Structures are given as C-alpha cells and as structure tokens.
Image: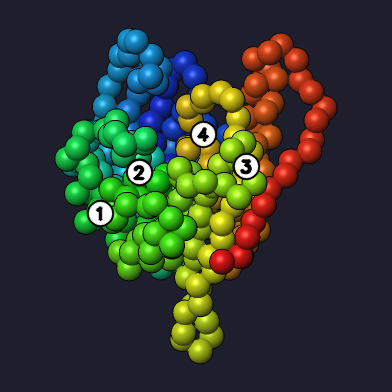
Amino acid sequence: MECRVLSIQSHVVRGYVGNKSASFPLQVLGFEVDSINSVQFSNHTGYSHWKGQVLTADELHVLYEGIKLNNVNHYDYVLTGYTRDTSFLEMVVDIVQELKRANPNLVYVCDPVLGDHGSMYVPQNLHPVYKNKVVPVADIITPNQFEAELLTGKNISTEKDAVEVMDLLHKMGPDTVVITSSDLPPRLGDRFLVSFGSQRILMPDGTRKTQRIRIEVPKVDAVFVGTGDLFAAMLLAWTHHYPTDLKTACEKTFSVMHHVIQRTISYAHGKITAKKFFYICVCMA
C-alpha cells in the first residue's frame, strides 16, 4: 500500500541538507515523497557565503492550492524541518490541520529547528510560533537538548530533568518525543553520545502507557550538516513500521545514522571500508 509523505524543508544546490537529506532515503524505504522547499539556497548557511530565496507563506499557499485543486492532497505523513519565516510556519500549521481533518490518522513529524549548543540559528520570533502553534499539532518531535529546553523553559542537567522535559513536551501535544542529542555524561564513556526518547501509547482500555528509552551511540570525530534532517526522516520511516515500539524504531534510526556517517567519512578519506559493526546501548527507564 502506498504511503505518501509531504516534506516541507530546505533545499540547497550544493550539499545535502533538508529535503536533499530526507527525500531519497525515504524513497529507498518505499515511501512516496512530495517535496516543498521552504528555502532554496546555493548551499547551507554554514558557508562563508550563500545566496537564494525564502518561500513565503503566500507562495506556500499557492503550491498547496495547486495540489488540492487536482485532488492529490492525500497524505499519510507530513515532515517539516528548517524554515526562517513565521508566517510560513503558521501556514504549515494550517495545512497540517486541514490534512488531519481529511485524514485523522495522518502523522505529523516535526524537527523544531531552532538552534544548538546554546544559540539560535533561526530568527528568534520563530520560537513562540513553534512553542504555541507547531508543537501542539505535531505527533512526533525530534528536538536536540537546546531546542527541548527552549520549548519547555526547563534546563536539562540530569536524566530526571530529561524525563520531565519530555513529559512537558507530551503535555504540549506530541505523543512521541526524541531528544536527539544531549550534553549529559554517557555511562559507556566519553566516546558516546546520550539521547532520550518517550512515547505515550493509548491502550485498548483508554489508558495511556509511556515507554521511555535512553540511547547511547558512538560519537564521530567530525562535523556534518543535514544529520538532523536525515534523523527525522528515518524516525518517520521506522515508527511507521514500529508505531508502538519506540525502542526498535530508535535502534534502527540510529543504526542508519551511524552507517551513513561512517560511509561518508570513508568516502571523504577516499576509501570504503567493509566494517559493518555497530554498537548501541538502549536502556529501558
């Protein structure tokens, strides 16, 4: 059965971020992907120079109306990432709400791209829009530690803090929260990175069960862009296959990330290794 994703993210001519990081991996896994580019830049903004255009809310509306007039606005998932305009983000919310009215089972996966390591790399006026309008309509969100803290107003200094922040995010709307990276000390040593996940599951009797996981993955001695976009796309894919098993979905997502990064490093070094070993520690909280 066809599973169709509307992916609203950035596009770059050179490099792999946004839709260029998300669309092809989803297609490889069997998803049909319709892409709308929130921005079209020459390259990502980490370069010294970049040029391009930002799609406005009106332009987004025109594109969506074209899809709707042809009666092909039928989606199972919406995936969103980087944008720089508040009215555009508000239009995304309107589109998601309309699509959910047409398909109550639609799942909205949101990577709330705000910043990292204590600083924002989008305009600050996007923060209240994400907090008050976007997150409440999302089903799955993938913030890093800084973004999770920003959205909830609570710092994460301990694992207990991380659980409380995820609970606060649940109360805002999403049933699945994955904090993709944190600064907390790993149990396996400094060469690992700690992430957290939490999923609320509606039981047949109407009650809710919460599954929590702590994940430690190997650090890589390199810096990449587009990894968050790939992560959100792969979490979409694997939660589709394991909708009530966040542990397995995250294991598979982090495994993909690790192998893609390792293969990218090998290409950068001019060689491909046959190494396929991957270690992941998932602890049930």
Location of the N terminus by quadrant is bottom right
Q: Position of residue 147 (x, y in %)?
A: 34, 45
Label 2: state its secondary structure: helix
Real-space CA distance between mark 3 and mark 4, rounded to the nearest whole angstrom: 23 Å
Q: Quadrant of residue 62?
A: top left
Q: Which mark is residue 146?
A: 2
Comes first in the chain, label 2 or label 4: 2
Q: Give the residue type at disc 1.
A: Gly
Q: Is residue 50 toward the left or the right of residue 254 in the image?
A: left
Q: Position of residue 54 (x, y in %)?
A: 26, 27
Location of the C terminus by quadrant is bottom right
Q: Is residue 55 toward the left or the right of residue 274 in the image?
A: left
Kindly identify which residue carries mark 3: 189
How is the model colour-coded?
rainbow
- Tag 3: Cα neighbours inside 10 Å, few (<14), some, or many (≥20)? few
Q: Position of residue 206 (x, y in %)?
A: 46, 86
Real-space CA distance between mark 1 and mark 4, rounded to the nearest whole angstrom: 25 Å
Q: Which numbered disc, 3 or 2, marks the residue closer to the eye?
A: 3
Kindly identify which residue carries mark 1: 153
Name the residue at 47% across, 58% down.
159
Comes first in the chain, label 3 or label 2: 2
Q: Quadrant of residue 183?
A: top left
Real-space CA distance between mark 1 and mark 2, rounded to the nearest whole angstrom: 10 Å
Q: Position of residue 59 (x, y in %)?
A: 24, 34
Q: Is residue 278 toward the left or the right of residue 184 in the image?
A: right
